[in-house]
Image (cartoon, helix red, strand yellow):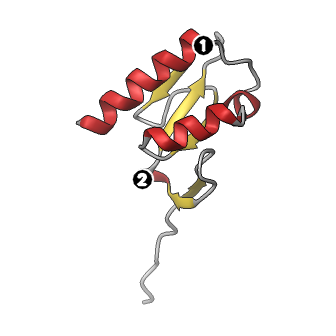
Amino acid sequence: MAVRVRKVPQRTCIGCNEVKNKKELIRIVRTPESDVLVDFTGKKSGRGCYICPCLDCLEKAFRGNYLGIKLGISIAPELKEKLKMELGAAILK
């Protein structure tokens, strides 16, 4: 009997535009209630995009407005700061 090889899910970082394993990236999600959250579980419902666990990629995503385009909303300055804090705390763990 042949051994089945499972395919590893791949996603693209919106900051550096590199394709990586899904588990290496962090998901940012816009919930149905229009809240924007960092989804560490990867299972929250809503429109999501993936980013590398580094602040450089987050800065690139903000600079090009890629995050707003992918999530279909405009990103307010206070939301940018909130996301930087959450992602920064996750990187330091």
**What residue is shown at x 39% (from left), y 24% (from top)?**
86
- Whether residue 48 is visible here, answered yes or no, is no
Residue at the image position 55 percent from the left and 35 percent from the top? 59
Q: Are marks 1 and 2 in contact (CB under 8 Å)?
A: no
For residue 21, say whether it is visible: yes
Q: Residues within 10 Å of mark 2 (few under 14, many from 20)?
A: some
**SS of the residue under disc 1:** helix
Disc 1 residue type?
A: Pro
What residue do we see at 45% from left, 88% from top? 2
Residue 84: horizontal and vertical position, in percent?
45, 25
Residue 24: mark: 2
Q: Residue at the far bottom: name it.
A: 1
Residue 73 sits above or below residue 16 on the image: above
Q: Residue at x 45, y 38 (%)?
A: 55
Depth-wise, is mark 1 or mark 2 nearer the camera?
Answer: 1
Q: Quadrant of residue 85?
A: top left
Q: Which residue is mark 1?
A: 77
**Comes first in the chain, label 1 or label 2:** 2
As measured in the structure, the alpha-carbon distance from the residue carrying label 1 to the one carrying label 2 is 27 Å
In the displayed structure, would residue 7 be above or below residue 63? Answer: below
Q: Is residue 27 left or right of residue 30?
A: left
In the rendered view of the protein, which quadrant contains the C terminus? top left
Viewer-proximal residue, 10 or 7? 10
Nearer to the camera, 51 or 39? 51
Image height check: is 51 above or below 71?
Answer: below
Name the foreground residue: 56 vs 17: 56
**Residue 92 percent across, percent down from the top left:** 26, 36
